[in-house]
């Protein structure tokens, strides 16, 4: 996410700002944390959000440089006003709120909504099922095939198909009943932040999802010789579905990065945070460098 706010003449230390001093002439200040390559560290968490579906472990690692950067940026704005040493609790607090909202909270929501949106886009094409519903169906096929040893010798194809249809009917009924009992808060969370995973099967058309499941299971029986080949095939299909959702996250983040920054800067900071800070006497709050000074004295 954007690593410095749009306008920083008073609280945030601008990317480019003029510093007037009695001792020095008017000069342009360029914030090193707001320019490349350091600035790129502030975007790594966005990449982590976008790839969370296809590489969950790697996505967590992408948060490390971003969080380190946010901490450095907040401390820098606390300590310096442009290129002048001028510790300020107000600047630090404002920058912390800005980074928390514009770089962490809102981009996370935006990325997950993008994944959900692209998952739903699949409902207007092909089998008219969401990407998440297809993914969960493929995972069920894999689990069912392994647990029932469908590739064992002398298996009857018709019996395998009937047994699968019965199992999937039970799976669909269970998912539907379970999701209907959820309250509105859980359902909204599932839509915004959980990529509709809990309700993917339950919100699907029953005939379409069962037809898709039967077709994909039959394809497994026709094209795979054993469980290893089946898992390889299904994992490739699942990866394609996840990649589509990751594209949705990237798209959402690219479209919302600017509006999010402006909203946080001009609404949250200017209209709520700054007026609230005017009521706080920051002069009575210890500076970071003051902690521990009493003991040393």
Image (spheres, rainbow, N blue to C red):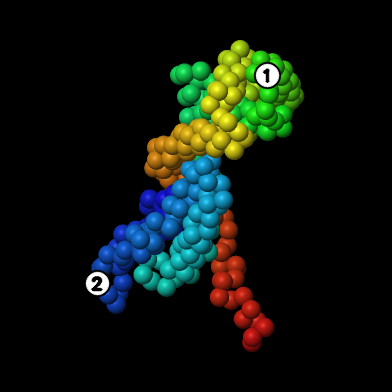
What is the residue that sits farthest to the bottom in this orientation? 297
What is the residue that sits farthest to the front in this orientation? 154
Q: Residue at x 56, y 71 (%)?
A: 287
What is the residue that sits farthest to the top in this orientation? 207
Task: Using a 10 Å C-alpha cutoff, classify the residue at mark 1 as few (fewer than 14 neighbours), some (14 to 19) or many (20 or more).
Answer: few
Q: Picture coordinates of residue 255 (x, y %)?
A: 39, 37
Look at the numbered discs 1 and 2 and tell me whether their residues touch, using CB distance below 8 Å: no
Q: Residue at x 51, y 18 (%)?
A: 127
Q: Element under label 2?
A: loop
Which one is nearer the viewer's eye here, 38 or 262? 38
Checking the image for residue 243, the label placed there is none
223 shown above or below 296: above
| The C terminus - image quarter | bottom right
Q: Element under label 1?
A: loop
Q: Residue at x 39, y 61 (%)?
A: 38
* Residue at the spot of label 2: 25
Task: Using a 10 Å C-alpha cutoff, classify the residue at mark 2 as few (fewer than 14 neighbours), some (14 to 19) or many (20 or more).
Answer: few
Q: Picture coordinates of residue 43 (x, y %)?
A: 43, 52
Q: Residue at x 44, y 55 (%)?
A: 42
Image side of residue 172 versus residue 288, left or right: right
Q: Picture coordinates of residue 122 (x, y %)?
A: 48, 23
Whether residue 200 is visible: no
> Could you say which quadrant of the image residue 20 lies in?
bottom left
- The mark nearer the N terminus, 1 or 2, is 2
Whether residue 26 is visible: yes
Image side of residue 168 versus residue 132, left or right: right
* Residue at the spot of label 1: 156
Image side of residue 117 versus residue 179, left or right: left
Q: Picture coordinates of residue 78 (x, y %)?
A: 48, 65
């Amino acid at each position: 996410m954007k690593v410095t706010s749009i306008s920083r003449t008073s609280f945030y230390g601008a990317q480019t700002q003029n510093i007037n001093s009695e001792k020095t002439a008017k000069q342009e200040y360029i914030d090193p944390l707001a320019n490349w390559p350091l600035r790129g560290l502030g975007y790594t968490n966005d990449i982590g959000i976008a790839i969370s579906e296809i590489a969950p472990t790697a996505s967590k690692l992408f948060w490390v440089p971003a969080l380190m950067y946010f901490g450095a940026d907040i401390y820098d704005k606390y300590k310096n006003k442009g290129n002048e040493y001028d510790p300020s609790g107000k600047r630090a607090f404002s920058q912390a709120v800005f980074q928390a909202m514009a770089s962490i909270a809102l981009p996370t929501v935006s990325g997950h909504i993008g994944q959900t949106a692209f998952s739903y886009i699949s409902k207007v094409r092909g089998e008219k099922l969401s990407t998440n519903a297809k993914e969960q169906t493929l995972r069920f096929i894999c689990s069912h095939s392994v647990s029932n040893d469908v590739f064992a010798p002398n298996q009857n194809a018709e019996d395998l198909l009937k047994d699968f249809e019965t199992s999937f009917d039970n799976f669909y009924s269970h998912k539907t009943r379970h999701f209907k009992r959820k309250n509105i808060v859980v359902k909204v969370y599932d839509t915004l932040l959980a990529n509709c995973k809990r309700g993917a099967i339950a919100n699907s058309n029953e005939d379409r999802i069962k037809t898709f499941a039967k077709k994909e299971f039959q394809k497994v029986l026709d094209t795979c010789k054993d469980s290893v080949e089946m898992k390889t095939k299904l994992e490739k299909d699942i990866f394609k579905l996840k990649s589509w959702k990751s594209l949705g996250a990237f798209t959402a983040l690219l479209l919302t990065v600017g509006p999010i920054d402006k909203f946080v800067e001009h609404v949250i900071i200017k209209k709520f945070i700054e007026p609230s800070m005017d009521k706080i006497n920051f002069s009575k709050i210890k500076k970071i460098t003051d902690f521990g000074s009493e003991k040393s004295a």
